[in-house]
Amino acid sequence: PNIVNIYDISANLGKAYIAMEFVNGQSLHAYLREKGPLSAREAINYMVQACSALEAIHKAGIVHRDIKPDNIMIAQGGLVKLMDFGLAKAEDARMTSSGVVMGTPAYMSPEQARGQDVDCVSDIYSIGLVLHEMLTGKTFFRTGDVIARQMTEMPPLPSTMAEGIPQALDEVVMKCISKDPKERYQTAEELAIALRAVTENKE
């Protein structure tokens, strides 16, 4: 339910097209621009749904490779829909040559920035940066040599940029965006469990 539905893939007069469901809502990017930083509870709600979508595609052997607020839709009623699989690939496929950088620099993992092969844990890094932005209202890797910064620079704790963020949520975000893939959550399901634990502890 958290992945946009595709109804048809075909071509007409030599032009390829995809017909997908109309999502009555707005992108997370537009929502954040309109509303600013989200409360911890609201951010966790949306992020757990996004993790559900990620877990589904990862179990199918697909890496999204372009997770960002523009590709996460919030439908009326609060249902999250992950979309835009234009850069997605099967984990065992080689669509691009080694050394070729594909994705959105502001959200790509260090290994993706280096042009290395990426896996599901790279999507975890990207979704971690999205969560950081949801909590702070700021895109951290926005200026300068973003590719180089992704490989060397760590964003500050979200709680130093916005109020009302518990330490446990800080820890979840920073684990997602570790420069070392082995130190991140290894699955979207692990991340969702950690996020739910933050909510339960707050209550």
Image: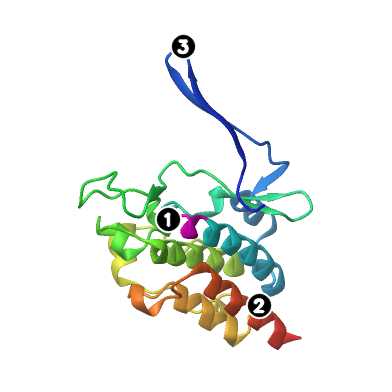
Element type at marker 2? helix
Depth check, front residue: 82 or 27:
82
Q: Residues within 10 Å of mark 1 (few under 14, many from 20)?
A: some
Q: Quadrant of residue 199?
A: bottom right
Magenta residues span 57-63
- Kindly report the distance in space between the C-alpha atoms of the residues bearing marks 2 and 3: 49 Å
Please state which amino acid type lies under the numbered disc 2: Arg
Asked whether the beta carbons under mark 2 and mark 1 sit within 8 Å of each other, the answer is no
Q: Which residue is mark 1?
A: 61
Q: Which residue is mark 2?
A: 196
Q: Residue 151 in the image: x percent, y percent? A: 29, 67
Depth check, front residue: 145 or 102:
102
* Precedes in sequence: disc 2 or disc 3: 3
Q: How is the image coloured?
A: rainbow
Q: Residue at x 54, y 48 (%)?
A: 71
Marker disc for residue 13: 3
User: Does the image show residue 164?
Assistant: no
Please state which amino acid type lies under the numbered disc 1: Gly
In the visual, does 148 lie left or right of 89? left
Element type at marker 1? loop
- Kindly report the distance in space between the C-alpha atoms of the residues bearing marks 2 and 1: 25 Å
Mark 2 vs mark 1, foreground winner is 1
Q: In the figure, 85 relative to 64: above or below?
A: above
Please state which amino acid type lies under the numbered disc 3: Leu
Marker disc for residue 184: none
* Precedes in sequence: disc 3 or disc 1: 3
Q: Residue at x 60, y 62 (%)?
A: 52
Q: Residue 19 in the image: x percent, y percent? A: 59, 30
Q: Quadrant of residue 183?
A: bottom left
